[in-house]
Image: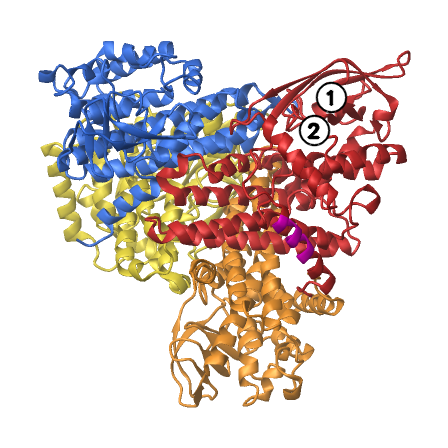
Chain colours: A red, B yellow, C blue, D orange
Amino acid sequence: MDLTWSPAEQEFRADVAGWLQANVPSEPLPSGDTAAGFALHLEWERKLFDARWAVVSWPEEYGGRSASLWEWLIFEEEYYRAGAPQRVTQNGIFLLAPTIFEFGTPEQQDRYLPTMASGEESWCQGWSEPDAGSDLAGIRSTATRDDAAGGWRLNGQKTWTTRGAFCTHLFGLFRTDPSAERHRGLTYFLVPLDTVGVTVRGFGRLDGDEGFAEVFFEDALVTDDLVLGGIDQGWSVAMATTGSERGLTLRSPGRFMATAERLVALYRERGPDAVDGSLRGRVAQAYIDSEAYRLQTLQTVTRVTGGDPPGVESSLTKVFWSELDVSLHEIALDLLGFEAELESPWMKGFEFALSGPIYAGTNEIQRNVIAERVLGLPRK
Amino acid sequence: MDLTWSPAEQEFRADVAGWLQANVPSEPLPSGDTAAGFALHLEWERKLFDARWAVVSWPEEYGGRSASLWEWLIFEEEYYRAGAPQRVTQNGIFLLAPTIFEFGTPEQQDRYLPTMASGEESWCQGWSEPDAGSDLAGIRSTATRDDAAGGWRLNGQKTWTTRGAFCTHLFGLFRTDPSAERHRGLTYFLVPLDTVGVTVRGFGRLDGDEGFAEVFFEDALVTDDLVLGGIDQGWSVAMATTGSERGLTLRSPGRFMATAERLVALYRERGPDAVDGSLRGRVAQAYIDSEAYRLQTLQTVTRVTGGDPPGVESSLTKVFWSELDVSLHEIALDLLGFEAELESPWMKGFEFALSGPIYAGTNEIQRNVIAERVLGLPRK
Amino acid sequence: MEFGFTEDQLAFRDAVRDLLAKECPPSVVRAAWTNADGRSGGATSGGGAWHALGAMGVLGALVPESAGGLGLSELDVVLLAEETGRAALPEPFVEHVFVGAPLAVDDHPGVVTGDVTVTAGDPLIPWAVSADVVVRLDPDPVIALGTDAKFDAVSSVDGARRLARLVDATESRPLTREELSGAFWRGNLGYAAQLLGLSRQMLDLTVGYTVDRKQFGAAIGSFQAIKHQLANVRVGIEFAAPLVYRAAHSLAADAPDAAVHVSMAKAQTADVAKLAARAALQCHGAIGYSYEYDLHLWMKRAWALAGAWGDAAWHRERVARAILDVK
Amino acid sequence: MEFGFTEDQLAFRDAVRDLLAKECPPSVVRAAWTNADGRSGGATSGGGAWHALGAMGVLGALVPESAGGLGLSELDVVLLAEETGRAALPEPFVEHVFVGAPLAVDDHPGVVTGDVTVTAGDPLIPWAVSADVVVRLDPDPVIALGTDAKFDAVSSVDGARRLARLVDATESRPLTREELSGAFWRGNLGYAAQLLGLSRQMLDLTVGYTVDRKQFGAAIGSFQAIKHQLANVRVGIEFAAPLVYRAAHSLAADAPDAAVHVSMAKAQTADVAKLAARAALQCHGAIGYSYEYDLHLWMKRAWALAGAWGDAAWHRERVARAILDVK
């Protein structure tokens, strides 16, 4: 066990921190889940890309620095510590890109990765449908072969598509074999949202931002080069992506450490006068939990770096960070007392945190996975 | 709404309190779940009976006072407040007796009720079997007709029989129609434990007392007058009893109010020096909850007195009191700090409280009942 | 001993429930988020529900008969507040009926019909700008009786609850110590009852959704993970309601422990409302998280009221002082 | 950066695990409840497991090589403590290996083999009467080196943990401030590791039972109500373990925050062990409540260690002081 950073890693951290200090906007940007805010966030993404901080773990040829997982962790710590803007490109970078790296053709990699990294093209996720939320295998949207047109005709509806109203592209699953049941017969498509027959309707989230969209498909034609992985192979291709979503890359410890630090600062300001004697212990516990999350990540990265791929244990991580995030914000709101109901970053953060136990597989589903695949309890 | 007691009720309370003050042993009796303690408790039961306090809500002819539900509540409040001994006869008085009152023949009522009230005969419950715990419909013990002997031959095994090693009689369900499935074909029997072919083996509980027993039946003959209710009608007869167990009669608010008062006293002694700032609020919350339980009972008694029978809402009550009881003791143990592990009434009470969410239908089962029968969610 | 409501009290509740079903469906609550004053009448000040309640006499329920009111007690109106919570009525109902009307009626007889609206805050005052009379409990307890009051508007998470701080008012008088105390505890009782109603509605909405919504080939309400979360909410409601009703009785009877009883009720209902909100959202999943679905209107009201006029921890501390500290 | 154990450390753990599987099956734990000294050897003082551990060198693991020990660090032995928790070893393992042996070895070289047993308490001392040397951290930190120590025995909920208070000892010396501090934090690390092992074993036992136990025509482990309780325990263990291992590293490295890191580990493991005990009992139902079934042996050890040498709240307060109070 060695809990020190190498000189090279320390230097990397200093570079990141230095650049962020010089470049992070002094005033927070408006929410990236609004049209105006999204545009401003894309400008920030471009700035990150130009300085090669947009996709540090990618190869140099696509705009990255071939950073190790350790360096990626360091980057994320510094990014959140600096209070830098939300990454509106994250669904592409963290969910789609790993899949393109693994399943994409060289042409697809060259075509999509650089524009994704720069923010020139932005990607939203087309997983959920009105009747396929927790149960993704219930997807009904179809892709029907049209040999005459040389491609596939998409029909159906996606929904809960985060930032769908602002993005240029969608990645998602469509049923190519209508006779197949559940997880079979699905294909993974990359879909430009300006395709004829595609209609996007934005709608509001809990916090008032227009962060969701419904996407309707009516005989929308997508050509063969927009298939990612094989025909009817969509489920296994997508599972690689959801593996990333639930795994290491999305929820970096830096996010919760930064929130815990802000909570500590709030406690120092408000806590000593608080009537509620439990707050002190609750703040300490949330801090301990954010430490635990960081350390568990170090443990996982050590294992992964040693060649052991992350597995179903990612369900443990999902349950923990999503509940920790809710808890951090609940404690802050309790510290704010009657002022909790006022507009504030804490209330906004709380509303966002409440989505954590729901998206990317509800925590109920995750607990089933833990019970069945980690503990070995019977499916039914 | 009228939250005052009538002069007659106040007089009743004064009578109860006066008698208890004069008669409750100054030193606590040894646990009634040990052989020696059980005998001493029976002496106390006899004393209660002689003063007509053993079964206040029963008719005078069986040793009671025909007390109203309000008077019964008052009796229980005073009983727990006085720290009077645990009622080792409670399984008979609170679970079997209501069933005998409802389903018993006049001969059975005259034969069993007075000796039960006096403690001359003591009753244990033969519900659970090794493979029928939460799922009582899985009962396998059989009663086979023996016309030659003029009765029924019992075979099989009961277990988790509280105080079974000390009691004289058992009431329980046996399968009389082996072709019937699940809830059908069961019959309710009253079984003297000295019947030839019955073997009782006591075994220990979590807290070390020999409070449990296994009861084995090998061709034990019971005559027809020991059938309670009709042949093959055991399930509906038993449900009336479990209705009592889960309902109003067993868990009187007085028990939790008395525990809450002891917790308050402990807090006054230990709390001000405690490091744990959450304890004050937790004690207050437990006190509020015991008040809530008392008030909800007043509400229910008002309704029942008005002619509305207690229904599936008793599952709400079971979940609440059992968790409250655990919580009251957990808080006390946290107040005791490193001394919590020492033998004490709080630790003993904690161990007992942990059985609350398990027996008389686990809280998991109760939550299913609440969801399905109170809220109307689908069974499956 | 009798723990229940009279036929009259229940009939009054039913009448208000029917009125609200008609005058305050979810569309009215939603409209209040974006209209001019955050109230039930659309663009005009004072909504349809408000005037209908006034016509029924509800708005002057606690005003003495000698002053034109119904001369009722807290026990008579607690169920009405619960109904306004269930409907998420976007009006200063508690602030007017439980707090302000009895204080303002001598100067403004119109409070009885709702032609004059009173609101109240401690210190954040909901619907302050559209009200005619404003009671501020903290700092400097005062009732602003005229039209010259000045406010600083602030935004609540509940878009209908237009909040402001009272900055200045020359046409005003200080509250007496007794007025302040009565106002504070009656207001908290009203909020507790509304929180109870909000909890019931969030539970009902979620039961309805989970019975209909199918995933994995079954209604999601058939899964234990859903059932047990909602069962816990139902248990919480079952053991919060009697505390609210007892507190109403204690205030009506001027019982010595009335304030402690109100604190018990407010602590319990604030906690159960937050539990109900959390469980409701989780059991709904993504649809509950969307602005177009109604759940969030109830959830945000619950968050706001849970913290207003003392949150659960504050009220628990009041109980702690009463039971733990040796006097 | 590397967060993991070396091959040697893991091999040492495996060796101790194998030893305990042989020398300390549940029957040995159960026997300790009723034998003379509460330890693993039946009627004689110092059990089979104890001498086997001594033969392996484990009992002198933290004693410097110059004094005949293995000269290892906290990081090398933390996994061994976890294994003794998993086995519910009825011996003063933490008290001897983590606390007492390094303090007593100069006077009693036999601590290295276990021929001399050291125990320790703060203030309740487990297995005090059967030990040869006793360390008391509070009140008056002292090490009783001779045979004249006098005790007041008290009963623990864990029948194997024979507790006593040290009343008097003339053949003793006071602990230095540094000895006291080192002993306290090393002991707490050891308990944290044992609590982690106890939690793992309670979970494993419960998984095994719920896979086998059938009710309503299915293994009860197939019901979500069981699955989710046990999943929560598994999550708790997952995010307690790294805190324990980090604390061991910090003590071994003499890091400035080592004491805070130990407090984090103890707070987290105490909570997760209590959660595991509660869930295990509930998922077992009546059988778990019976004395003849093994679960309670683990559960009661967990309860005892969760409170010993500072409970979760006490250790959280230590963390709070470090992070919240402006220095």
Q: At 44% from the left edge and 76% from the top edge, which residue is drawn?
A: D137
Q: Residues within 10 Å of mark 1 (few under 14, many from 20)?
A: many
Image coordinates of residue C217 in percent, x first then y, are 65, 22
Residue type at the position of mark 2:
Cys
Residue type at the position of mark 1:
Leu
**First reached walking from the N terminus: tag 1 or tag 2:** 2
Image coordinates of residue D132 in percent, x first then y, are 51, 83
| Image position of A232 (left or right of C302) | right
Q: Secondary structure at mark 2?
A: strand
Subunit ID for the residue under disc 1: A
Q: Are marks 1 and 2 in contact (CB under 8 Å)?
A: yes
Viewer can see residue D141: yes
- In which quadrant of the rendered image does the N terminus of chain D lie? bottom right
The residue that disc 2 covers is A124
| First to last magenta residue range | A14-22
Image coordinates of residue D240 in percent, x first then y, are 58, 56
Viewer can see residue B199: no
Rendered image: mark on residue A193: 1
Q: Quick check: D85 above or below A316?
A: below
Q: Secondary structure at mark 1?
A: loop
Q: Are marks 1 and 2 on the same chain?
A: yes
- In which quadrant of the rendered image does the C terminus of chain D lie? bottom left
